[in-house]
Image (cartoon, helix red, strand yellow):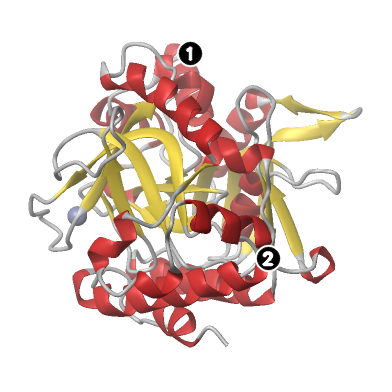
Amino acid sequence: MLKYVNKLFSLKTPYKTKESDELFVKAMAQNCKYHYDHCEEYKRILDDFGFSPESITHMDDLSRLPFLPTLYLKKHPLISVKESRMTVKASSSGTGGVKSYVGLNFGTLFRAFKMVQRVAKYHKLRSLKPTRYVVFGYRPHRGNQLGAAKTAYLFTYLAPAFSRSFALEWKDGSYKLDLDDIKEKLIKYASGKLPVRTMGFPAYTYFLLREMKEQGIRIKLPKGSMICLGGGWKQFYAEKVDKQDFYALADEVLGIDDKHIVEFFGAVEHPILYTDCKYHRFHVPVYGRVIIRDVDTLEPVQNGKPGLVNLLTPIFDTMPMLSILTDDIGILHDEPCECGEGQWLEILGRVGIKDIITCAQGAEEMLKTVMEAL
Ligand SMILES: [Zn+2]
């Protein structure tokens, strides 16, 4: 029984993060010990680093806990339970053709479910009004293990679905993008009464909005409509637009103001729901913590400075992914936010993408070195 882990995911307020530090540390220590005892490969890694799960007693100890790069996990999935006990398997689309593999069991899913309910309540994402969903992403398919498709589908349960449309449809053995079909549906829905919720990749949403603007199409979606963004810009970082420009475009073309645009951040290896507040900042929720690491030394940097994003959570009991090092470059901010919540994470971009910030250059090399050491 992972008592402290379950307690953490039962917290009712998703952003009283500072107040939950003590519980978070206990949950991490418990989760670490569990994986140490159940996954030989993980035990070997911790032993190699001379790290003992019992030594986690304070928040600072978590920065010493060996982290696993997501790139490493893609090549060496570590598993702490019998594979037959996993109820759901998900994988990330991956860049360069390497997919991450993540298996979930009932305990992990139940924690995720509770987290989503709390976060959705806080951000007022739940509604009883029948809603038309327009997903800028994949329609789930039997052969499709993509985490993004599953997450997007789960979202269509936050308000009862009157209809569901997908921009990526499975046709003749592969996914085909059909933005024209989505455009026609949006125009049709604008004259109806039911609210519309779009969700999915920001790049696809943006491409469609830009096209509609160029074609001189201006509609006003019914009251209560929302734009939900998730999954990041991925291979479209070069076309990433300034948030304010994006909001202005959505207002102009669909008649949706920025208070009805919500963005999510997360990773298959770190399925914690980061949701932007009404001032569009990703506050760190109680279920996870973020450490930003220097790209050369991998030591934690001061808040306010950019570095590699290291994400921590004890949510999994299937795989030892307590502390993962992503290839995202980000900043952890301490400045107060108008919404009243605490620390927030800003994602600047991804390692390997030019023109983001200079610190991305050293990071790629460093990640390779870490992988060789594991
Ligand atoms: Zn805020």
Q: Is residue 155 visible?
A: yes
Q: Is residue 193 visible?
A: no
Foreground residue among 91 and 41 = 41
In this picture, is 44 found above or below 309?
below
Q: Is residue 337 left or right of residue 255?
A: left
Amino acid type, residue under disc 1 in the picture: Gln
Q: Is residue 290 left or right of residue 4?
A: left
Q: Where residue 216 appears, x then y in whole percent? A: 43, 16
Say which label, 1 or 2, has the lower sequence index.
Answer: 2
Foreground residue among 246 and 95 = 95
Q: Quadrant of the C terminus?
A: top right
Q: CA distance from mark 1 to mark 2?
A: 53 Å
Q: Is residue 322 left or right of residue 261?
A: right
Helix, strand, or loop for circle 2? loop
Quickly name the residue at label 1: 215
Q: Quadrant of the N terminus?
A: bottom right
* Residue 346 figure quarter: top left
Quickly name the residue at label 2: 80
Amino acid type, residue under disc 2 in the picture: Ser
Tell me what residue is drawn at x 28 percent, y 25 percent.
Answer: 242
